[in-house]
Amino acid sequence: MNLKEDGLSRIITGALCALNLTEANQALAEQYLEPEEADPALLLKAKHQDFSKLSGLAREACLTWCKELREWAGAEGLLARYVRFAAAVGGSSACHVLVSRRDLSWLSGQLTKEQTAAFRAELYAHETDTLQQGCLSALYSMGNKAPEVLLGAMELCWGQDDASKILLAGTYLYCVSLKDAVAEQTASNLLQRLLRRLPELFGGKVFSDPELLRLQDFVCNSSGDEPVGTDLRKIGRAHV
């Protein structure tokens, strides 16, 4: 990498090192991050990696390097390329190395709608308050405007579990209008997947049969604006 500023070169080198990239992705990053080589087509060559598997210390290092890059005056172009590269490699899991405290505001304009939805799902999927509609309002808003965005976001969830994908499926089912047979079949397939994988929203814990049936009944039969009952909150808190 031939970045002109030594300090900036140190930051981006540290950021890439913290990502623990494969050899192929490291070489691709060094090519893509050079201004004269920043061809978006290069991102199609990225090999998927799951950044959620990084240790807590590694994630913190990534966030620290990213913060330094954000604060470097005149590095906006490099920052944008770094974000797009991390998202191309990590899919939804890239939020773990780019986003601190759920703050996605600074990423506005640098991610596609699908990537933004995937990031939000990954951030919310393992939270104890996942089933509260208030914390999912951004996903609901995106799904109401364009349900297909949520389907595209599901394709970006290649992490170590399906929690974010299941959350997107549930949100899609809430938002979609079943206007044709294709939409109805898609919704039916997603509902069956959601019901089978529902425990993954709670870290893969084992529910008793009555607890699981209660959760599945709420998913299938509640109205979109129905509040989560006390019994469901107790079940959720007991299994996180």
Image (cartoon, grey):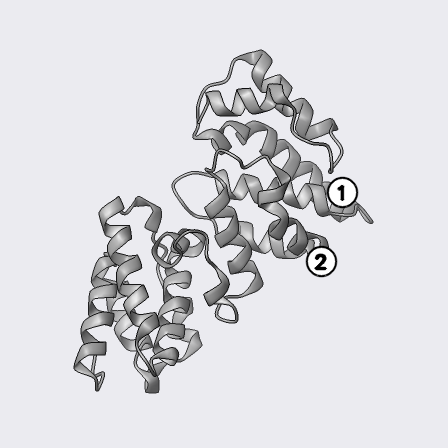
Image coordinates of residue 224 in percent, x first then y, are: 73, 38
- Decide which of tag 2 and tag 1 comes sooner along the chain: 2
Apparent side of residue 135 relative to residue 106 in the rendered image (left or right): right
Apparent side of residue 60 relative to residue 176 in the rendered image (left or right): left
Which quadrant is the N terminus positioned in?
Answer: bottom left
Q: Residues within 10 Å of mark 1 (few under 14, many from 20)?
A: some
Image coordinates of residue 217 in percent, x first then y, are: 68, 23
Res 37 quadrant in image: bottom left
**Front residue of 7 and 185:** 7
- Mark 1 residue type: Glu
Q: Residues within 10 Å of mark 2 (few under 14, many from 20)?
A: few
Give the labeled residue for mark 1. 184
Kindly state the secondary structure of the residue where label 2 is placed: helix
Compared to residue 111, the image places residue 227 above or below, namely above
Marks counted in the figure total 2
Apparent side of residue 36 relative to residue 136 in the rendered image (left or right): left
Compared to residue 19, the image places residue 213 above or below, namely above
Image coordinates of residue 6 in percent, x first then y, are: 17, 81
Give the labeled residue for mark 2. 145
Q: Residue furthest right?
A: 179
**Front residue of 131 and 161:** 131
Compared to residue 63, the image places residue 181 above or below, namely above
Compared to residue 3, the image places residue 86 above or below, namely above
- Mark 2 residue type: Lys
Residue at the spot x=24%, y=51% of the render?
Answer: 58
Image coordinates of residue 60 in percent, x first then y, are: 27, 52
Mark on residue 9? none
Kindly state the secondary structure of the residue where label 1 is placed: helix
